[in-house]
Amino acid sequence: MSMIDVSAPSKGHNKLSDALADAKARFAAANPQSLARWESARAVMPGGNTRTVLHYDPFPLTMVKGEGGYLTSLDGGRYADFLNEYSAGLYGHSHPVILKAMGEAMAGGIVLGAPNRWEVELAALVTARFPSIEQVRFTNSGTEANLMALGAARAFTKRDKIMVFDGAYHGGVLYFAQRDVAVNVPFDVVFGTFNHMEDSLAVLNANAEDLAAVIVEPMIGGGGCLPAERDFLQALKDATSHHGIILIFDEVMTSRSSGGGLQERLGVIPDMTTLGKYLGGGASFGAFGGRRDIMALFDPTAPGALPHAGTFNNNVLSMAAGHAGLSAVFTPQAAEDLYRRGEDFKARLNGIIETLGADMQVTGCGSILGLHCVAHPIRRPGDVKDPRVDRKTLVHLEMMLRGFSFAQRGYMTLSLATSGDDEEGFAAAFEEVLRRHGDIL
Ligand SMILES: Cc1ncc(COP(=O)(O)O)c(C=O)c1O
């Protein structure tokens, strides 16, 4: 798939730094146009970047085309897409149902400035599918959805504090992989420890009177694709119910885990849920919803209603494509099938790792997976901190050189357009990379 010769021997390098330098040199040699593009971008955008997560070492490839399950780079390289726009690309790049819906929406005018015919149908589907969502509102992004859900919880409970988990990611201004992030919204935040019931309940109980909300990803996504243990989520559910705190599941990433999200699969139903990513069919999207009594706060016909603005909340492209995708393509059965395929793929990659004795593992849930270069059991983001982060960079670049695209931090997803052959090819390339660098990995 790749345009360059990847079979050249590794020149006997057995040190990580040498192997990495060699991989970077081959990557740069194979992608001169992307490199030039990135260098010119640096003049007008800090680091040549307008979305931090898209930068990687030594420079990111510019993609010029997406088709089915494939991407084409500026340098003409063809890549099987295992990133799939960080899970928003669930439908692949050119699903006919999505293209048709978007085409029809565009033909009818894209800035109507009024309720349109798709939003209520999409809302009906979302409320029918996700057990916790009795009513829903749309936003432009998952970040906004979480901000609105947290605001709603604060208004409903008349309390201020928010409980989050170390390593969580709820959006560009709700980033909890580190403490004291300057760009975060200044909520009064307390931290629990993911998948650590005792510690988290201690924090929750100590702050119970002031806590408006506990927000949790049922699988930590950006922090490494680490599924929450069911008992942990159930304990949060019980404690928040007891104290009148709003439990919010951030299912921006995990909603694809079944017809009704990870909440349905696990059987733990929160008070509110936030959504995003693929649910707009690949166009910008977010949604927050939950109990009717909480969502009623936003009813503009009621006195003192909470405002919820957003010029593009119901933009016709997201509404039409989202509705078409959810009704005609990503049915509950399709969600189940994709989940199983992802689990099988994860098992296959872990089988290769085990056979070759590499200090690695693949975590995740269904079709969203995380590659880690540590062998010990991982339950929470703190467990994946690996001082030898360069090993992941090496694997990533070697896989890119073989025509397989995913995130350098090890994040990968399957889309509906990912074929069995793509999975086969990925597994074979992965095995080859592990064999080539067996002395390092
Ligand atoms: C769990 C989770 N919450 C929220 C967000 C933010 O969504 P958006 O990028 O649409 O603002 C993301 C995005 O990756 C996410 O993974």
Image (tube, grey):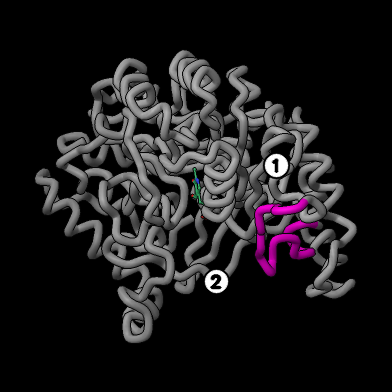
Visible residue check, residue 161: yes
x%, y% of residue 368? Answer: 51, 37
Q: Residue at x 37, y 70 (%)?
A: 31
Helix, strand or loop for disc 2: strand
Q: Over which residues does the magenta segment extend?
A: 303-319
Q: Residue at x 55, y 71 (%)?
A: 64
Circle 2 crowding by C-alpha within 10 Å: few under 14, some 14–19, many from 20 = few
- Residue 360 sits in quarter: top left
Q: Please, is residue 368 above or below residue 27 in the view?
A: above
Q: Residue at x 52, y 20 (%)?
A: 237
Q: Is residue 130 left or right of residue 88?
A: right
Q: Looking at the image, tell me whether mark 1 or mark 2 is earlier in sequence order.
A: 2
Along the line of sight, which residue is nearer the eye, 429 or 163? 163
Circle 1 crowding by C-alpha within 10 Å: few under 14, some 14–19, many from 20 = many
Quick one: which residue is furthest to the left in this view?
Answer: 15
The residue identified by callout 2 is 64
Q: Does 314 appear in magenta?
A: yes
Q: Is residue 237 left or right of residue 36?
A: right
Disc 1 residue type?
A: Met
Q: Does 355 appear in magenta?
A: no
Tell me the tag on residue 295.
1
Q: Is residue 405 left or right of residue 141?
A: left
Label the magenta part by its dominant secondary structure: loop
CB at mark 2 closer than 8 A to ligand 1? Answer: no
Visible residue check, residue 431: no
